[in-house]
Image: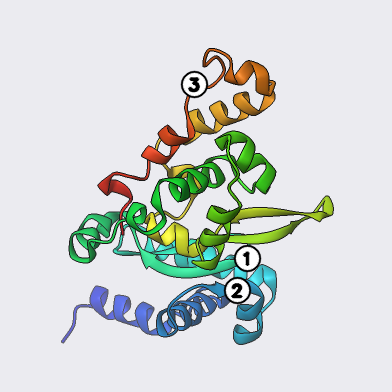
């Protein structure tokens, strides 16, 4: 016969009922696992028959439950996906051997670094920071699903480029703010943009970190997938 304490614990386990958020998070995880790749939040609302607030709560529950494991929930403004977590990225890299640099080249790494560290960015700003026309590179990154193009909220005539969950999965990170030297590099980009073009390019003043150096953050094995 079980001791009374163990019987009480068993009863507690039997009587436990998941909260609505926990139940929704389990359904969300199952859907993301069954159908790999990025999922639009707008589509998930219909598939899971829930509200935006309910989905947001379920996402937070799932992120917490996956914390410290081999997989992570990657979230952008418009998408969700399951991907390899930073905890297991070294092992995955060793097996797959596919580096992001080999897929998009140096120019692609520069654009990716700018978008990740600066945040949603116009093509004009990307060109200004790099000092060259980036239209072909940006188109390539969009076609490969690493960047997405959205209309700017304050000007419908303007488009912004922002990272996708596919890109975040490549980097094995859930949040761009967790990237190396995030605050430092973001600050340097901001300083560079605030200075006039003439001052920024004269004798190297004002350009504390070049696009090539930004990109260097992604050329090492730490950012391979």
Q: Which residue is mark 2?
A: 40
Q: Which residue extends farthest left?
A: 1
Q: In the image, residue 117 lies at what x, y percent?
A: 53, 41
Q: Which residue is mark 3?
A: 208
Q: Quadrant of residue 47?
A: bottom right
Distance of mark 3 from mark 2, alpha carbons?
37 Å
Q: Give how far apart the Cα atoms at labels 3 and 1 are.
A: 33 Å
Mark 3 Cα shell of 10 Å, populated few (<14), some (14-19), many (≥20)? few
129 lies above or below 113: above
Q: Nearer the viewer, residue 33 or 51?
A: 33
Q: Position of residue 57 (x, y in %)?
A: 59, 66
Which of discs 3 and 2 lies nearer the camera? The answer is 3
* Disc 2: CA contacts within 10 A as few (<14), some (14-19) or many (>=20): few
Sequence-wise, the earlier of marks 3 and 1 is 1
Residue, disc 1: 78
The reply to whether dot 3 and dot 2 touch (C-beta < 8 Å) is no
* Colour logic: rainbow
User: Which residue is at 18% across, 83% downward?
Assistant: 2
Q: Residue at x 68, y 24 (%)?
A: 194
Above/below status of 64 relative to 3:
above
Q: Residue at x 37, y 40 (%)?
A: 217
Under tag 3, what secondary structure? Answer: loop
Precedes in sequence: disc 1 or disc 2: 2
Which residue is more in the foreground, 81 or 194?
194
Closest to the observer, 109 or 3: 109
Answer above or below: position of 24 versus 138: below
Secondary structure of the residue carrying tag 2 is strand
Position in image of residue 103 (x %, y %) = 37, 59
Residue 5 drawn above or below residue 122: below
């Amino acid at each position: 016969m079980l001791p009374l304490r163990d019987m009480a614990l068993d009863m507690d386990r039997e009587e436990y009922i998941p909260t609505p958020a926990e139940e929704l998070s389990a359904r969300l995880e199952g859907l993301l696992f069954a159908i790999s790749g990025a999922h639009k939040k707008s589509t998930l609302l219909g598939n899971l028959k829930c509200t935006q607030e309910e989905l947001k709560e379920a996402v937070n529950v799932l992120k917490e439950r996956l914390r410290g494991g081999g997989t992570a929930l990657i979230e952008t403004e418009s998408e969700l996906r399951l991907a390899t977590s930073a905890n297991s990225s070294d092992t995955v890299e060793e097996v797959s051997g596919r580096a992001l640099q080999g897929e998009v080249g140096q120019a692609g790494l520069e654009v990716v670094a700018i978008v990740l560290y600066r945040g949603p960015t116009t093509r004009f700003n990307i060109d200004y920071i790099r000092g060259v026309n980036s239209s072909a590179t940006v188109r390539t990154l969009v076609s490969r699903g690493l960047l997405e193009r959205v209309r700017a909220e304050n000007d419908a005539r303007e488009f912004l480029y922002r990272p996708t969950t596919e890109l975040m999965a490549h980097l094995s990170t859930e949040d761009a703010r967790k990237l190396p030297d995030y605050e430092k590099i973001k600050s340097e980009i901001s300083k560079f943009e605030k200075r006039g073009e003439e001052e920024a390019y004269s004798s190297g003043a004002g350009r504390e970190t070049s696009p090539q150096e930004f990109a260097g953050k992604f050329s090492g094995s730490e950012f391979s997938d």
